Amino acid sequence: MTILIVGLGSMGKRRARLSKGLCPEITILGVDSNPDRRQEAAGQGITPYPDIPAALAENQVDAALVCTAPITHAPIITQLLEAGLPVFTELNLVKDGYEKNLALAGEKGLPLFLSSTMLYRKETQYIKARAQEFMASTGKKVNYIYHIGQYLPDWHPWENYKNFFVGDKRTGGVREIFGIDLPWLLDAFGPVEKVHVEKDKISALEVDYPDSYFITLRHKGGVKGVLAVDVVSPKAVRNFECFGEGIHLFWEGNPKSLYDFDHDSGEKRPVDTYTAVEQDSRYSDNIVENAYVDELDNFFGVLAGTQQPRYSFEKDLETIALIETIEEE
């Protein structure tokens, strides 16, 4: 198999490395307009090209991964679909080109696969299964409280936050957190029917969007959630609790921090969801490589016709609509 990765920044190189880990025989091509990135990629087993036509002119490509800034995705996806390639794309965060690209993918019979890595985390899968089983068996509801935050300059310590997409209002840091975490919350607790938002700017960060949000969500099934999202927390934080009469789950964002409270013993029981965890040392311990591997494996399964994607552009339209509701409140 030969895959083409468009965008050779940190995520593109990560996808290349993990693809090789899944399929050692895979051939990886890369496209990036930055000559320094191309040179670096060449030393990492990636054959680099300055643009998509140059890569396609010299190679028979089986699929493409779009790993550029979110706001650039739509025309790249269109170009790849028109070239007859199945497409995997990172989070878009905006719905630009959705109607056109969905129609084009359908017309050509090509998979259009959208990343939503938190859906592949074993911890979120456990929380979903445990909460849904509890509600189904008892008829009771649950609530949750969830705080996600990290100081924006620490997201990519190797570059200025104003120089990549989190500095852009349409794809800002808070909006990216929404794009990452709302899909699994909607998957676990169902669609949202009511929203209340408090937001402001409490930092000196040079961004033109609120850096701190407090949101209450009422899901259609009766679940209530409090979501606190910010880009000012000095320590990267992902603190989640789900509770009800007879259930209390705790999670701090990494595989060793998931607990299920045992009422009889009065203690939090650790839940081991991973036998092995791959971790990139450059990132917070909240970033687990296994989920990225599982997501790529799902994409390769879709290409082989043996799996269905866990996320879709149609579902993402619902997520983006909720994000826009939150931002407009």
Image (spheres, rainbow, N blue to C red):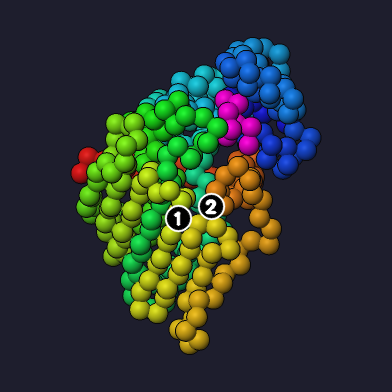
Q: Identify the residue under disc 2.
A: 286
Find residue 138 and report its horizontal and vertical position in percent.
38, 78
> What residue is shown at x 63% (from left), y 22% (from top)?
37
> What residue is shown at x 51% (from left), y 36% (from top)?
156
- The verdict on residue 54 being magenta is no
Amino acid residing under circle 1: Arg
Q: Quadrant of the C terminus?
A: top left
Left-right relation of 193 to 5: left
CB under 8 Å between discs 1 and 2: yes
> What residue is shown at x 53% (from left), y 36% (from top)?
157
Quadrant in the rendering for residue 271? bottom right
Q: Which span of residues is magenta-colored?
A: 7-14
Question: Badge 2, how many Cα within 10 Å: few under 14, some, many 20+?
Answer: some
- The verdict on residue 8 being magenta is yes
Secondary structure at badge 2 equals loop
Amino acid residing under circle 2: Asn
Q: Quadrant of the N terminus?
A: top right
Find residue 145 and report its horizontal and vertical position in percent.
35, 62
Quadrant in the rendering for residue 18? top right
Given residues 201 and 147, the one toward you in this image is: 201
Q: From where the camera sits, is residue 114 visible?
A: no
Secondary structure at badge 1 equals strand
Q: How many marks?
A: 2
Question: Badge 1, how many Cα within 10 Å: few under 14, some, many 20+?
Answer: some
The Cα atoms of the two marked residues, 1 and 2, are separated by: 7 Å
Find residue 239 and report its horizontal and vertical position in percent.
43, 59
Residue 238, labelled with which disc?
1
Given residues 85 and 267, the one toward you in this image is: 267
Given residues 81 and 122, the one toward you in this image is: 122
Q: From where the camera sits, is residue 83 visible?
A: yes
Which mark is first along the chain, 2 or 1?
1
Q: Is 240 rendered above or below residue 323?
A: below
